[in-house]
Amino acid sequence: MAVKRSVFWSLEAKDQVDVIKKYVCSHWSEREEKAFLDLLHEFEQLVAQFPKGYQVSSLYPGCRRAVIHPNISVVYRVGRNTIEVVTVYDNRSAKSQ
């Protein structure tokens, strides 16, 4: 059985989550904000147990990329006992190309 690792969020990742939350709140409702936060929580649970379950990132060397929604990706780095979430980004942006 896989060892469950602790998940830590970088400052950049936390900032990006806040930006996305504000955007969702300003364009939709609290229900969509909650759905976004639920996606992040589900990602944390899965990646903690299966850290290599997502594809290797071509944009971020040494990292993996999880597409948690057609519009949102999470980039993370696997450590010995931890997972570090490096950033979160909108797949429609130039960064994802």
Image: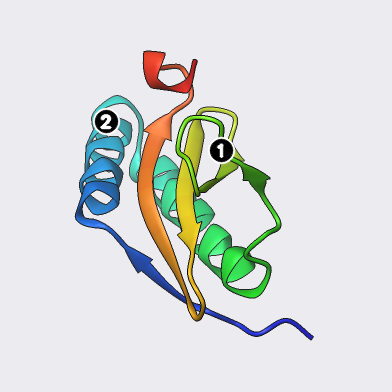
From the viewer's side, name the closer residue of 28 and 43: 43
Q: Residues within 10 Å of mark 2 (few under 14, many from 20)?
A: few
19 left or right of 62 in image: left
Q: Residue at x 65, y 74 (%)?
A: 49
Return the residue at label 2.
Answer: 23
Vertical arrangement, residue 28 with respect to residue 93, above or below = below
Q: Residue at x 43, y 41 (%)?
A: 32
Identify the coloring.
Answer: rainbow
Q: Residue 64, percent across and down?
A: 56, 47
Vertical arrangement, residue 47 with respect to residue 59, above or below = below
| Callout 2–callout 1 Cβ contact below 8 Å | no
Q: Residues within 10 Å of mark 1 (few under 14, many from 20)?
A: some
Q: Which mark is in front, 2 or 1?
A: 1
Label 2 SS: helix
Gap between marks 2 and 1, in whole Å? 25 Å
Q: Residue at x 35, y 30 (%)?
A: 28
Earlier residue among tags 2 and 1: 2
Q: Residue at x 48, y 41 (%)?
A: 61
Return the residue at label 1.
Answer: 57
Residue that protrudes farthest toward the right in the picture = 1
Q: Find residue 90 and report its image quarter.
A: top left
Q: Amino acid at mark 1?
A: Ser
20 left or right of 67 in image: left
Vertical arrangement, residue 11 with respect to residue 67, above or below = below
